[in-house]
Every structure is written in structure tokens, then in C-alpha cells.
Image (tube, rainbow, N blue to C red):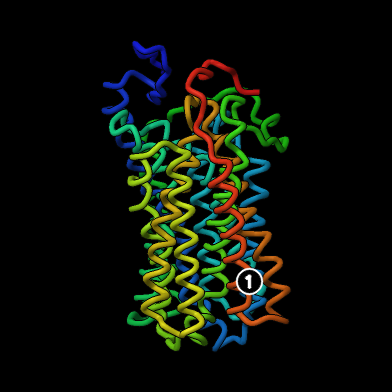
């Protein structure tokens, strides 16, 4: 619903139904979608603390680990391209349940990892599930979010991913270090959480009525509404740089923590990864106090400051400084990502949301895939600290572009239709 204010400006109001009906009928759906998205990315994050075990016990290399990140991200990209709009036609619930089922299959495969091929296959299944969830569950969250506070929809949809990754990494690190069956227990726990999520989604109300055109929607298509298309270059810079850093933490920080920062604790590794992902959810509400353009500038400047701290910590071998700089970068990416998402969602209709989120995650996983693929090859030539310098250079370029080019959405073009 779009409400015209007395001063003639247009404000974006997101309810799919009347505000009262939305808050009561759809509240369980909102909770189910949030819990499910946390479960999806907890599963994705659960493998991170195990990477060093696979390196030590099974002889996996940094290049091999990096290729698992590429496999995951490439599968996610492919799914977003082909199935990104499917939930608009078959409904949010069945699409979300299918995504959760793929994650269950991935976890079952990872219960017995002793070969890099099994790890790649398991991460590929996780990527398929995460790609389907990225468009369907995030759109489901926005559809069912309460009308107040107004920032909840964009923050919950953009930051639940980071929260899930942090939860999965910390839980995995703790169970690997202190629990029985260190290579299996976390996957069993995550499978239970995913099955619970499937149940919650199954008993929730859908927000989309099935509509024809499902087969036609499988044709790859990338689009955002015309009214926010000019915001896409800066959003791309923000998403590419921040998600590239997240992929760096997955692929190279396990080796970095052990070799440069001198600890082999799986829990510490999980906490370091969570220190990047977790604060993102805290930074997002802070960004809602500013316009999308201002929040993106603030977020990316702080993100670059975090990278400067991380490079300093790597050079000096200071683990506390590395964790502190990681927290700064994590909170900063939350500010920048949620602001970019808020701008792209401005004035969105129900049918706009899945395609918008498909574009958001296509950009995000492109940022994770392309630098990881390049880094996997370079890791045979350059050390991890040198690779970190390359990622920090990417952060610098993205920050400069954001500071120069960030813009707010037009408030007078809400009625313009998407192409």
C-alpha cells in the first residue's frame, strides 16, 4: 500500500493485507520465515569451524577449501537465476520447504566427509537450498512483517542471513571443541533445526496465491523496478565488497587464525567468523536512522576502517585486534547492506519482492564467487596475508565509489511500474 502524505510526498507502507489483519494472521508466518532463514544459514555456517579439521586430518588444501566456497556460491547463483521468481507462482511456503529440504540433504552428505569431492558436493547442495531460500524466505519475511516498526522488514530480510551464519559458526565451534562426534554432531543438530523449520512453515499461512506462469518464470531474468534501478550500481558495490569479505572469512580465515594468529581452537575460529557476521544484525537498525544513501556511505567508511584494522592485526599477529576490527567491519556491513536493501525495496509491491531479492543475492553471491575463484588460484602462489591485501583493496574501491555515487530513491515515482 502507498499512502500519499499531506506534503505531497509518497511513503512506502508494506502491508499485503490490512494492517490489523496482517499483524494477527501473518505474525506466525513472519516468525516461521525468520526462524527458517536462520536455520538455512546456520547450516551454511556450520561447516566453517570444521575446515581446519579437514585440513589437518584429511589433507585438504587452502585452494580446495576455497573451491568449496566457489561451489556453494555458484550453486546459489544458478538457483537464483533460474528459480528466483518461482515463489511468486507456486507460493512462498512450498518453495521455502523445498529449500529447507535441500539443506537437509546437504547436511546428511556432510556427515561423512573424508574426500574433498564429498565436501564440495555437500556445499553444492547447501548452495542450491540457500539460493532458493534467499529469494523465497526473504520475500516471505517482507510479506509477513508487521507494519511497525517500519524498518523491521528490511532489517529482518537482510540481516537474518548474517545472524544465521554467526549462530551456525559459534554452535559448530563449541560442539566441535567440546562435544562428542566432532565431525558429525553439528550436522545432526542442524538437521533437527531444519526439520523443525519445515514444520513451522507448513503450518503457517502463505502470502502468495498460486498463479500461472511458473514454467515461464524459469527463464533466467534479472530485473528490479525502474524507480530504483539507478540505485543498483552502488548497491552492487556494497554487496560485492561485503560478501567477498564474508567468503574470505569462510575460505581463508581458518588458515589465517591458525597460521598467523596462532590458535587452533575451533571455538575461537567460530567466534572470529561470528564476529564478522553477528554484529551485522546490530548495525542494521543503526542504519535505519539515516537515509539509504547516508547509511551506505557511513557503513562503507566504517567497513574500510575495519579492514585497515584487520590488515594491521595480520601484520602484527594480534588476535584481539583482529577480532575487534572484525566486529567493526561486521557492524558496518550491516549498516551498508540493510541500507542498500531498503533503497531497492522502496515502494515495492508483492510481486516485486522475490525478483528484487533475487537480484540482491545474485550480486551478493557474485561477490562471494568471483573473488573466491581468483583467490583459489592465487593461493598456490601468494600467502594468505597477501590475499587479504587484495580483499582490502576491493573494500577501498567499493567505499570510494559508494561515497561518490550513493543516492536516495525518488519519492515521487512510486507508481512507476517495473519492467
Whether residue 287 is situated above or below residue 120 in the rendered picture: above
Which residue sits at x=54%, y=63%? Answer: 245
- Asked if residue 374 lies left or right of residue 130, the reply is right
In depth, the one of 34 and 106 nearer the eye is 34
The number of numbered badges drawn on the structure is: 1
67 shown above or below 85: below
User: Is 325 drawn above or below residue 1 in the view shown?
Assistant: below
Q: Position of residue 44 (x, y in %)?
A: 49, 61
Please identify the quadrant where the C terminus is shown: top right
Toward which corner of the image does residue 263 lie, by quadrant? bottom left
At a point 64% along the width and 66% down the height, the residue shown is 121
Quadrant of residue 318 in the image? Answer: bottom left
Work out whether residue 197 or residue 74 is closer to the camera in this orientation and state it.
74
Under circle 1, the secondary element is: helix
Q: Residue at x 33, y 18 (%)?
A: 18
**Could you say where residue 162 lies in the image, as x and y percent from the top left?**
43, 55
Residue on which the image places disc 1: 66
Residue 125 in sight? no
Give the image location of residue 296, x and y in percent.
Answer: 47, 45
Q: In which image quadrant can residue 150 be found?
A: top left
- Name of the residue lying farthest toward the front: 404
> x%, y% of residue 340?
50, 41
Say few, some or many: other residues with alpha carbon within 10 Å of mark 1 (under 14 / 14 to 19 / 20 or more).
Answer: many
Amino acid at each position: 500500500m502507498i499512502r500519499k502524505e499531506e506534503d505531497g510526498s509518497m511513503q512506502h507502507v508494506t502491508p499485503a493485507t490490512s494492517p490489523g489483519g496482517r499483524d494477527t494472521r501473518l505474525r506466525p508466518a513472519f516468525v516461521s520465515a525468520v526462524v527458517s532463514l536462520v536455520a538455512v544459514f546456520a547450516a551454511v555456517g556450520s561447516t566453517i569451524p570444521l575446515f581446519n579439521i579437514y585440513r589437518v586430518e584429511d589433507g585438504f588444501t587452502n585452494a580446495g577449501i576455497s573451491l568449496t566456497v566457489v561451489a556453494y556460491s555458484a550453486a546459489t547463483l544458478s538457483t537464483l537465476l533460474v528459480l528466483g521468481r518461482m515463489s511468486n507462482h507456486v507460493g512462498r511456503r512450498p518453495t521455502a520447504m523445498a529449500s529447507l529440504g535441500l539443506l537437509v540433504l546437504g547436511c546428511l552428505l556432510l556427515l561423512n566427509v573424508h574426500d574433498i569431492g564429498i565436501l564440495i558436493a555437500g556445499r553444492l547442495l547447501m548452495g542450491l537450498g540457500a539460493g532458493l531460500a534467499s529469494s523465497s524466505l526473504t520475500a516471505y519475511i517482507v510479506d509477513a512483517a508487521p507494519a511497525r516498526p517500519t524498518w523491521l522488514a528490511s532489517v529482518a530480510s537482510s540481516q537474518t542471513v548474517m545472524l544465521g551464519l554467526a549462530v551456525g559458526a559459534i554452535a559448530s565451534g563449541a560442539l566441535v571443541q567440546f562435544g562428542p562426534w566432532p565431525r558429525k554432531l553439528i550436522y545432526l543438530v542442524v538437521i533437527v533445526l531444519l526439520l523443525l523449520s519445515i514444520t513451522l512453515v507448513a503450518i503457517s499461512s502463505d502470502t502468495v496465491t498460486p498463479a500461472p506462469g511458473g514454467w515461464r518464470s524459469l527463464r533466467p531474468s534479472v530485473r528490479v523496478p525502474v524507480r530504483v534501478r539507478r540505485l543498483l550500481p552502488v548497491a552492487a558495490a556494497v554487496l560485492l565488497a561485503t560478501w567477498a569479505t564474508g567468503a574470505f572469512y569462510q575460505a581463508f580465515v581458518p588458515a589465517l587464525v591458525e597460521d598467523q594468529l596462532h590458535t587452533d581452537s575451533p571455538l575461537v575460529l567460530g567466534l572470529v567468523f561470528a564476529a564478522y557476521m553477528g554484529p551485522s544484525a546490530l548495525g542494521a537498525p543503526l542504519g535505519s536512522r539515516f537515509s539509504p544513501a547516508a547509511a551506505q556511505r557511513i557503513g562503507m567508511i566504517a567497513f574500510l576502517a575495519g579492514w585497515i584494522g584487520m590488515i594491521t592485526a595480520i601484520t602484527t599477529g594480534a588476535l584481539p585486534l583482529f577480532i575487534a576490527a572484525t566486529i567493526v567491519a561486521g557492524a558496518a556491513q550491516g549498516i551498508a547492506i540493510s541500507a542498500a536493501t531498503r533503497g531497492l525495496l522502496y515502494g515495492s509491491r508483492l510481486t516485486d519482492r522475490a525478483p528484487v531479492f533475487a537480484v540482491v543475492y545474485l550480486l551478493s553471491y557474485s561477490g562471494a564467487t568471483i573473488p573466491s575463484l581468483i583467490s583459489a588460484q592465487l593461493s598456490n602462489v601468494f600467502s594468505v596475508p597477501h590475499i587479504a591485501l587484495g580483499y582490502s583493496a576491493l573494500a577501498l574501491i567499493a567505499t570510494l565509489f559508494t561515497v561518490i555515487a550513493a543516492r536516495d530513491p525518488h519519492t515521487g515515482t512510486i507508481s512507476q511500474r517495473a519492467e
